[in-house]
Amino acid sequence: MRYARELFAPLGAVVAVGALHATGIRSFADVSVGAFLAGRREQWDRLFTAVCALCAFDRDEATAIADEMACFRDYDLSAPLLVLWSAGVTGVESLHDRHRRSYAACAAWLPTSN
């Protein structure tokens, strides 16, 4: 299951952008990733199955990792999270700390209002 998290994080960002776009309002407060995916369950299942097949991921293990990451259900979506995810997440452990620092730096200059 190597690289599952590194793949699911940016995929979660794509889903979040889709959920944001689906609101038609562009307000983070109105975004529900869970509702967005629930309304597209069949498409999501096909996509997730294809990703698992292409990456040779065990579907049950991949689902457990995705559930643990919580990027495919409701959470407080924010601009800093999308900025962080847009850079991707690497498999090099030492770089994870750099991304956390980058998130803090992004949060400092991004507007706090949704």
Image (cartoon, rainbow, N blue to C red):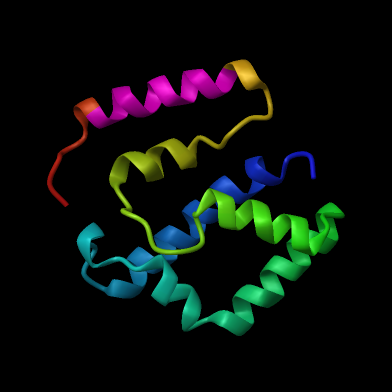
Q: Quadrant of residue 82?
A: top left
Residue 42 in picture, x, y percent from top left? 62, 84
Q: Is residue 42 above or below residue 114?
A: below
| Horizontal arrangement in the rendering, residue 79 relative to residue 55 (left or right) | left
In the picture, measured across the screen, residue 50 lies left or right of residue 113, that is: right
Q: Most extreme residue toward the top, as rendered?
A: 94
- Which residue shows up at 61% across the image and 50% down it? 8
Point out residue 21 in the picture as x, y percentages from the top left corner: 35, 68
Residue at far right of view: 56
Residue displayed at 64% across by 21% down: 93
Q: Residue 7, image x and y in percent?
A: 66, 46
Q: Residue at x 76, y 56 (%)?
A: 61
Rendered residue at 77%/67% (across/down): 50
- In the image, residue 97 lies in the stretch drawn in magenta: yes
Report x, y in % for residue 62: 72, 56
- The answer to whether residue 96 is magenta is yes
The segment highlighted magenta reads: 95-107
Q: The N terminus appears in which quarter of the rendering? A: top right
Q: Is residue 2 above or below residue 71?
A: above
Horizontally, is 103 left or right of 64 in the view? left
33 versus 38 height, above or below: above
Dominant secondary structure of the magenta stretch?
helix
